[in-house]
Image (spheres, helix red, strand yellow):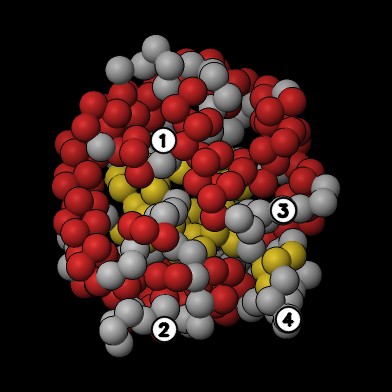
């Protein structure tokens, strides 16, 4: 995936969208989104996966996603729709949107106020920054300052009854001067203000073991991106790779996991891809 492409996509699509808006089964059942049979109750999809279709026909794509079976979606741009238009389309299709990806520039200053207003109308619970530019993450000091900033953003979100999170790629797991940047972000942040959406593919690609992170930082991972990986590192639909999602999700209560968001960065057939992933997760027995 091209990081620049994704950053540009999220930033420009969102900016346009804001125009006019200033263990055991019993243990698993304690996790908020796993039933007593050990199956996921709700499954979300990151709409970046179907971005081409969203550009072509926003409302039809939302309807097609709902027909697959998804009860939740995660946005990465609103394609010039107002918050009320987005909410109405979601309501007509019987789905919700607990989370959205937003550029770092949109969670600062007056832009944050507009974003909060937009999010409240749509019904988002989480605002998530999905990426840092290379020049923003060269040193440990940069990560420390970003974490301070994220705490402050999280404070503003909390005042509005929203939550704030950051979505990882692989680079946050690559040590700088012997220190793993994601550890700085977790150790120096307030869990009441800021947490992590763990992208499982990128965490594994970065050499991390998700379950180990759940154990080291319990409750800090309320959302995850569910995308699979082949033995040679290729991104594939869920169920077509080597990642043991059932084993990872068995630690959902420990991790604090509530939202499971399917994503594929470059699928050949977006609707087929999200359908494949949905069927795998819907039929998966956890624990």
CB-based contact (under 8 Å), mark 4 and mark 3: no
Which residue is farthest front?
135
User: What element does badge 4 sit on?
Assistant: loop
User: What element does badge 1 sit on?
Assistant: loop
Q: Position of residue 161 (x, y in %)?
A: 25, 37
* Foreground residue among 181 and 47: 181
CA gap between label 2 and label 3 equals 28 Å
Task: First in sequence, mark 1 or 2: give its number.
Answer: 1
Task: First in sequence, mark 4 or 3: give its number.
Answer: 4
CA gap between label 1 and label 4 equals 36 Å
- Which residue in the structure is indicated by mark 2? 212
CA gap between label 1 and label 2 equals 29 Å
Task: First in sequence, mark 1 or 4: give its number.
Answer: 1
- Which residue in the structure is indicated by mark 3? 266
Image point (32%, 79%), residue name: 176
Task: Answer yes or no: is residue 88 visible.
Answer: yes
Tell me if mark 1 has few (under 14), some (14-19) or many (20+) residues whose alpha carbon lies within 10 angstroms of its own.
Answer: many
CA gap between label 4 and label 2 equals 22 Å
The correct choice, above or below, for 210 with respect to 45 in the image is below
The correct choice, above or below, for 63 with respect to 197 in the image is above
* Eye-nearest disc, 2 or 3: 3
User: What element does badge 3 sit on?
Assistant: loop
The correct choice, above or below, for 215 with respect to 239 in the image is below
- Which residue in the structure is indicated by mark 4? 232
* Eye-nearest disc, 1 or 4: 4
CB-based contact (under 8 Å), mark 2 and mark 3: no
Q: Position of residue 122 (x, y in %)?
A: 44, 26
In the rendered structure, the answer to whether residue 247 lies left or right of residue 16 reads right
Toward which corner of the image does residue 220 lie, by quadrant? bottom left
């Amino acid at each position: 995936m091209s990081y620049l492409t994704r950053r540009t996509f999220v930033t420009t699509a969102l900016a346009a969208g804001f125009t006019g808006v200033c263990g055991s089964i019993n243990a698993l059942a304690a996790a908020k989104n796993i039933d007593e049979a050990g199956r996921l109750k709700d499954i979300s999809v990151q709409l970046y996966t179907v971005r081409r279709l969203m550009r072509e026909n926003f409302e039809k794509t939302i309807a097609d996603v709902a027909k697959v079976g998804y009860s939740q979606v995660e946005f990465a741009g609103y394609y010039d729709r107002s918050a009320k238009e987005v909410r109405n389309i979601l309501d007509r299709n019987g789905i919700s949107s607990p989370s959205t990806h937003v550029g770092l520039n949109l969670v600062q200053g007056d832009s944050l106020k507009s974003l909060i207003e937009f999010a409240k109308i749509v019904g988002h619970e989480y605002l998530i920054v999905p990426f840092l530019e290379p020049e923003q993450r060269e040193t440990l000091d940069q990560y420390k300052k970003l974490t301070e900033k994220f705490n402050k953003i999280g404070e503003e979100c909390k005042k509005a009854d929203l939550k704030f999170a950051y979505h990882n790629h692989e680079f946050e797991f690559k040590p700088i001067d012997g220190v793993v940047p994601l550890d700085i972000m977790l150790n120096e942040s307030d869990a009441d203000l800021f947490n992590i959406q763990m992208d499982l593919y990128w965490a594994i690609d970065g050499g991390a073991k998700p379950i180990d992170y759940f154990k080291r930082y319990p409750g800090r991972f309320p959302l995850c991106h569910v995308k699979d990986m082949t033995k040679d590192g290729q991104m594939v639909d869920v169920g077509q790779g080597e990642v043991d999602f059932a084993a990872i999700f068995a630690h959902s209560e420990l991790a604090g996991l509530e939202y499971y968001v399917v994503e594929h960065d470059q699928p050949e057939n977006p609707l087929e891809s999200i359908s494949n992933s949905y069927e795998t997760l819907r039929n998966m027995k956890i624990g």
